[in-house]
Image (cartoon, coloured by chain):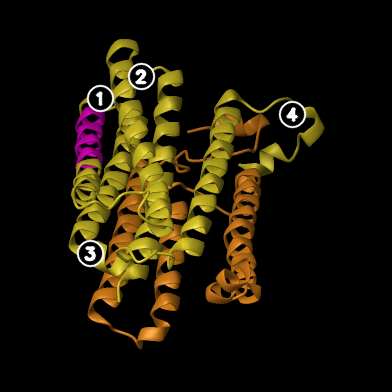
Amino acid sequence: MSAVAEEIPLSERGPAPTRVVVSFGFWLFLLSDIVIFSGLFAAYAVLAQRTAGGPTGAQLFDLKHVFLETCCLLVSSFTCGLCVLAMERRKRTMIYVWAAVTFVLGLSFISLELSEFIGMFSRGINPTRSAFLSAFFGLVGTHGIHVTAGLCWLAVMMAQIVTLGLQPKVAQRLLCFSLFWHALDLVWIGVFTIVYLGAHP
Amino acid sequence: MNSNATLHHSEEAPGAPPDADPVTNLQSYVLGFGFAIVLTLASFGAAVMHWVWAPGLPVLLAVLAIAQMGVHLVFFMHVSSSPDAVNTVLALAFGIFVVGLVVFGSMIIMANLNDYMMPMEQLLQMQR
């Protein structure tokens, strides 16, 4: 592959194809998004012990709940990969099936997270209670908003495949979506390790 | 998949399944999924069942998390070390550098400030 390419000097190869440029641009967006998360992680790491007499992480978090959330997101990441493979093979039915599974799993993740938050709010545990809780809701909430945005994006992608078919443009967008979805799972690994398992006594 | 494109451009698009053979691609996803499950179970198991000496637990959790992030990057996001993907890897390296700077920099600075800060009771005394 690269043996052929090496015969043409780099300066004479012209601009990279759109496929590469778009993917690389999206890759840079993902990295900058992860830098945003790193700021929230830093805030959490600094403020985790500042509970101002309020509840601590060990008292609040239910690891069974978190384990279920983790499973939902991990399996949805896998099915999202299968959806991309179905797209590469041009198998429309399988694209819809795996996209639907991904969507349902992502929705279960969000519902689990919302139920956790609502349970906390009903007990008067909200971001204004302590610096620890501000950092917690800031970090986990931002991740939740990202997942919600991802679900909207997935729904739009399915609508585009129905209306526009599997054009290269649509395929490119679905590929970007899969990258985004995997990146969210990557961030979640940090969240469950640092926030939830880190607080476990 | 992209034999025509590679004739003139040796770059690889980030995130695209690299192999022309769909079976190999499927194997990559299944293998990555298997690794990810094992590492997730190990993380939760180590934290809940106290498999290791308690002060060493954060180190084990960090190792397992970094390993799982690596698995996701390689098997799901198809980051490879091939010369065709050098831009992707360089951008990733810079991203990791900034993340490390922000997280560990904040932690070190705040710990340092805490060390130099006057105890709260003394501070309140002085304000009277």
- Of all chains in the rendering, the one displayed in orange is B
Q: Are marks 3 and 4 in contact (CB under 8 Å)?
A: no
The amino acid pointed to by label 4 is: Arg
Instruction: Please give the chain letter of the residue carrying mark 2.
Output: A
Q: CA distance from mark 1 to mark 2?
A: 9 Å
Q: CA distance from mark 1 to mark 4?
A: 35 Å
The amino acid pointed to by label 3 is: Leu
Label 1: element kind: helix
Residue A92's disc is 1
Quadrant holding the N terminus of chain A: top right
Q: Which residue in the protein does label 2 denote?
A: A166
Residue A99 relative to residue B4: left or right: left
Range shown magenta:
A94-108
Mark 2 or mark 4, earlier in chain: 4
Q: Residue at x 22, y 28 (%)?
A: A96
Residue A63's disc is 3
Disc 1 with disc 3 on a shared chain: yes
